[in-house]
Image (tube, rainbow, N blue to C red):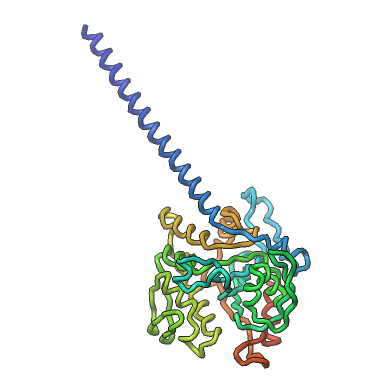
């Protein structure tokens, strides 16, 4: 009797352990499945946020040459080495996407797309240093003939305002106009709208900037005393758009503020350990991709991640910000033209790097 009792008790214990282990296993399996599903959904969501424009097909082969790829070191451990060649990216800040959020932040309507900011980001071979060249939107340039999405093409225009290219022919015409101006191949373009920029700053927890003079601008609704300030997304965007409340009220003063903001954002991103907070990482990724229009070479999360990984050695300290050298236009003192030979020398230095 005793022996049978012990045997029955052992079987019951083994049965309970078996059920417990099975429950733990099912829980872990369920958690794993849910995690994979959540990760898959997040990837699908972020990937679907990005809008792509096929610039290469639209412009064809009559363009400046691409940078020569750098051969990968022999014996590298990576199956697919990260790219290391120099790369040029045209970055546009625009209010082209209509909607309540954009309009509340000063954006335009769907019939009045504007490119308020244009920067040529040149990343040197090796991708450990970069130069950001701001192009004043009031610069008078030769706007080339551009293909239109609806078919046909625009006429060549001499002495056209630089930002009219985007208004007339969208990103394709903006890229072609920059390449005509610089003779530098734009390998990619990235367009960010008002709402996305503000959300990105908020997702990063704000950005800290220092201004050297008081700012009072009724147009951007920004009032800021000289000094150091931690700005949320709405105020950071107002700073990026300010022009009448600083310096001589020209676009050059605003460019200086934008360059300060770019450096501050890079420092904020590098100091924020996003990998320790999946929630914040997703918010940042959603803010970036949700506001993004790119060329088809960057219009997927995988392509953006590869670009980001290739820039891991690039710090804010190794980013140089400059403005295209300009002088008042002889035809209109409220407009500017490239100042030669300094402007050509600047573009030549990017072609050599």
Q: Quadrant of the N terminus?
A: top left
Furthest toward the left, the residue is 2
- Say which of 261 and 242 sits in front: 242
- How many labels sit on residues? 0
Identified at 34% across, 25% down, the residue is 19
**In the rendered image, is residue 348 in sight?**
no
Horizontal and vertical percent position of residue 331? 67, 92
Furthest toward the right, the residue is 62
- Say which of 205 and 2 sits in front: 205
Compared with residue 44, is residue 99 higher up or lower down, i.e. above or below?
below
Identified at 30% across, 16% down, the residue is 11
Q: Is residue 294 left or right of residue 239?
A: right
Furthest toward the top, the residue is 1
Horizontal and vertical percent position of residue 53? 64, 61
Horizontal and vertical percent position of residue 94? 55, 71
Compared with residue 126, is residue 144 higher up or lower down, i.e. above or below?
below
Horizontal and vertical percent position of residue 263? 50, 73
Identified at 39% across, 82% down, the residue is 223
- Say which of 231 and 124 sits in front: 231
Q: Quadrant of the C terminus?
A: bottom right
- Say which of 347 and 72 sits in front: 347
User: Could you say which quadrant of the image residue 22 lies in?
Assistant: top left
User: Could you say which quadrant of the image residue 161 lies in?
Assistant: bottom right
Identified at 44% across, 58% down, the residue is 283
**In the rendered image, is residue 103 in sight?**
yes
User: Could you say which quadrant of the image residue 133 lies in?
Assistant: bottom right
Q: Is residue 58 left or right of residue 238?
A: right
């Amino acid at each position: 009797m005793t022996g049978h009792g012990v045997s029955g008790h052992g079987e019951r214990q083994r049965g309970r352990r078996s059920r417990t282990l099975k429950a733990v296993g099912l829980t872990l399996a369920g958690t794993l499945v849910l995690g994979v599903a959540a990760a898959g959904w997040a990837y699908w969501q972020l990937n679907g946020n990005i809008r792509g424009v096929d610039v290469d097909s639209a412009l064809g082969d009559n363009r400046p040459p691409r940078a020569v790829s750098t051969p990968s070191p022999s014996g590298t451990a990576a199956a697919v080495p990260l790219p290391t060649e120099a790369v040029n990216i045209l970055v546009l800040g625009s209010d082209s996407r209509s909607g309540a959020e954009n309009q509340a932040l000063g954006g335009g309507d769907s019939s009045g797309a504007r490119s308020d900011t244009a920067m040529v980001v040149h990343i040197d071979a090796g991708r450990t240093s970069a130069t950001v060249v701001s192009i004043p939107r009031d610069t008078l340039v030769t706007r080339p003939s551009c293909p239109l999405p609806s078919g046909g093409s625009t006429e060549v225009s001499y002495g056209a305002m630089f930002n009219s290219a985007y208004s007339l022919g969208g990103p394709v015409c903006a890229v072609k106009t920059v390449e005509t101006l610089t003779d530098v191949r734009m390998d990619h373009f990235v367009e960010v709208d008002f709402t996305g920029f503000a959300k990105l700053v908020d997702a990063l927890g704000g950005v800290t900037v220092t201004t050297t003079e008081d700012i009072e601008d009724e147009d951007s609704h920004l009032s800021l005393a000289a000094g150091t300030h931690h700005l949320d997304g709405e105020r950071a965007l107002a700073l990026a758009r300010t022009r009448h409340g600083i310096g001589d009220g020209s676009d050059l003063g605003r460019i200086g503020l934008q360059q300060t903001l770019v450096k501050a954002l890079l420092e904020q991103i590098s100091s924020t350990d996003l990998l320790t907070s999946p929630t914040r990482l997703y918010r940042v990724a959603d803010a970036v991709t949700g506001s993004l229009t790119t060329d088809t070479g960057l219009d997927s999360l995988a392509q953006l991640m590869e670009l980001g990984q290739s820039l891991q050695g690039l710090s804010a300290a190794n980013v140089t910000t400059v403005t295209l050298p300009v002088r008042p236009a002889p035809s209109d003192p409220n407009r500017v033209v490239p100042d030669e030979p300094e402007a050509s020398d600047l573009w030549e230095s990017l072609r050599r790097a």
